Amino acid sequence: MSAVTETIRIDAATPVQGCLTKMAIAPGAMGEAVRYTLRVGEQRLDLNARLGRPLALEWTGAIACTHCGRATKKSFAQGYCYPCFRKLAQCDTCIMKPELCHYFEGTCREPEWGERHCFQPHVVYLANASGLKVGITRRTQVPTRWLDQGAVQALPILEVDTRQQSGFVEVLFKEEVSDRTNWRAMLKGDTEPMDLVAERDRLLARLEGGLANLRERFGTEAIRTLDEAPVAFDYPVLEFPTKVVSHNLDKHPEVAGTLLGLKGQYLILDSGVINLRKFTGYEVGVS
Ligand SMILES: [Zn+2]
């Protein structure tokens, strides 16, 4: 099934209810803005088509674990029930901090999952979402990861064999550059374009010694310098907020306003912004 036939356009006359998953974000065709699809249960809503129009989300009070589907009173790690949060390798600390990978100690929560997800090529990249940052992601998650972060520019700089190695490289780069996005700054939309190729060359020169140490440890071929072209993304935003106020379904189950834009995993409404990823698994009605 193609992405086009999968996208069902829903207007205000068609109520939709289901559990939220993070929005599907795809690069736009040449010269076009990024494409956003809201995912509510099995239903899909083309959000680019909703720009400038009213949009309302109402939380029913129910949350379903994104992994096992069980009802949970509270969401852990953006969409899991507590047992899954404790049990799954994808909810372990080493996913956020891959340098803490403990597979080789025989304590991976799910060794088979780890082999599939962590022992495969990872990319270390520079991105500009609210200024320069370094990040890591699985090769297969490019460019999704950048779009989820609201990056306006990105450049893969190194490729490594495993997630753990990407963690060590990122720790090294953190001596020189942040690994965080300032989401308020990202949503204000005044991010200045940067020369990511020049930043890459500067950082690679500066961190040469540290990279040589890692190559000595993991093998020269394990950490490969990439020579790729930077990419840029244009987000569908009619108007950026001057003051960033965020909605929280836990405090106010009803969120409504005119949809002014989409950036990262945020909806920008005239009444405030909402990070939909944070509410993965929340059952909502959309109108
Ligand atoms: Zn669960």
Image (cartoon, helix red, strand yellow):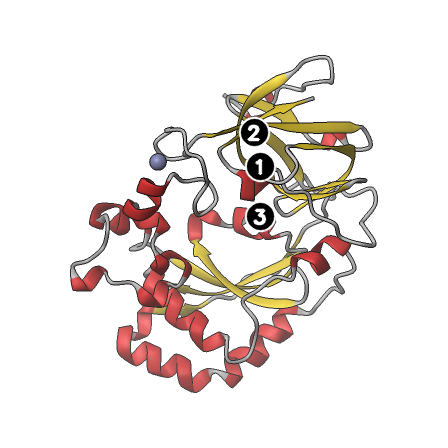
Viewer-side residue, 275 vs 237:
275
Instruction: Identify the residue under disc 3.
Output: 148
* Amino acid on which disc 1 is placed: Met
Instruction: Identify the element where label 2 is drawn.
Output: strand
For the residue carrying disc 3, how many other residues have a C-alpha within 10 Å: few (<14), some (14-19), or many (20+)?
some
Residue 262, image quadrant: top right
Residue 55, image quadrant: top right
Q: Earlier in the sequence, mark 2 or mark 1?
A: 1
- The reply to whether discs 3 and 1 touch (Cβ–Cβ < 8 Å) is no
Residue 39's disc is 2
**Mark-to-mark CA distance, 3 and 2:** 14 Å
* Amino acid on which disc 2 is placed: Arg
* Amino acid on which disc 3 is placed: Asp
Instruction: Identify the residue under disc 1.
Output: 23
Looking at the rendered image, the quarter that the C terminus falls into is: top right
For the residue carrying disc 1, how many other residues have a C-alpha within 10 Å: few (<14), some (14-19), or many (20+)?
many
* Residue 24 horizontal side relative to residue 216, left or right: right
**Mark-to-mark CA distance, 3 and 1:** 8 Å
Image location (x, y in percent) of residue 58: 64, 27
Image location (x, y in percent) of residue 50: 75, 28
Image location (x, y in percent) of residue 17: 57, 20
Outermost residue toward the left? Answer: 106
For the residue carrying disc 2, how many other residues have a C-alpha within 10 Å: few (<14), some (14-19), or many (20+)?
some
| Residue located 44% across and 30% down the image | 64
Above or below for 58 versus 279: above
- The reply to whether discs 2 and 1 touch (Cβ–Cβ < 8 Å) is yes
